[in-house]
Each structure stands twice: as structure tokens, then as C-alpha cells.
Image (spheres, rainbow, N blue to C red):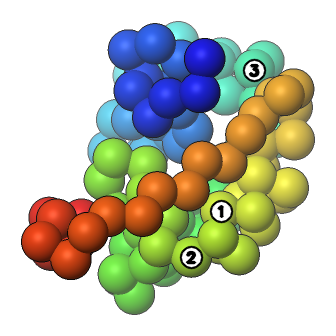
Amino acid sequence: ILTISNEVRPTFPDYWFFPWCNTHKNESNSSIIKSRLRISREEHEKAQSFLDTLIQEKKFSWPNVFKFLEDARFFQQNYLRGIENLEIISLNLSEEYRTDF
């Protein structure tokens, strides 16, 4: 199924990837990241920093939307390589809906 709904398929990066959701108190999130994504803590921190920069530059928005395909591909290749069969889905919205995203 090809969908953007995380109710049907998981989306990445999801809420648990971000520092405000993934604290030291929440070890289950850390174990998800370590086992599922197969990245180190240092790589996870680099990924968070990359996303923080994109958010500040308005190139990434919640929920899980990269403005530019190049950034999505970079993130996938560098931080999501542990996930097999991961697809990037591109959406084109009409002008009237773009301001919402």
C-alpha cells in the first residue's frame, strides 16, 4: 500500500525520532532507533541536528514533510539505511492547500 498515513504504514522520521519526544527517560524510543534504524547514538544526534536545521530553514515541517526531494534522499541514505524497501512519496498540492504545509 502506498500511502502517507502513518496509521497504515510507518513514516520516517516519526515523532519518536525527535529530541522533544525521545528523552533519556524513554529508553523504548532509543531501542527502536538503535534496533530498527541501525544507527549509532552519534548518527541519531547528527540526524536530529540535520532536521533541526531544515526546520529552521523551513525546509522540513511536521508531520514528516521534506520540502525538497534532495533533503529527503540525503536523510534516507544517511539515517534510514537500516530500513528495507523504504520509499519516498512526493506530493503535489494545489495552491490553496500549500499554505497549510
Where is residue 14 drawn, in percent x and y? 46, 35
Amino acid identity at mark 3: Arg
Outermost residue on the front side: it is 94
**Residue at position x 76%, y 34% in the image:** 86
**Residue at position x 32%, y 64% in the image:** 93
Which residue is nearer to you in this view: 89 or 39? 89
**Residue at position x 60%, y 17% in the image:** 1
**Residue located beneath label 3 in the image:** 36
Q: CA distance from mark 3 to mark 1?
A: 19 Å
**Residue located beneath label 1 in the image:** 72
**Residue located beneath label 2 in the image:** 68
Q: Are marks 3 and 1 in contact (CB under 8 Å)?
A: no
> Mark 2: which secondary structure?
loop
Which residue is nearer to you in this view: 60 or 28? 60
Residue 34 visible from this viewpoint:
no
Amino acid identity at mark 1: Ala
> Mark 3: which secondary structure?
helix
Query: How many residues crowd mark 3 within 10 Å: few (<14), some (14–19), many (20+)?
Result: few
Residue 91 visible from this viewpoint:
yes
Name the N-terminal-most of marks 2 and 3: 3
Q: CA distance from mark 2 to mark 3?
A: 25 Å
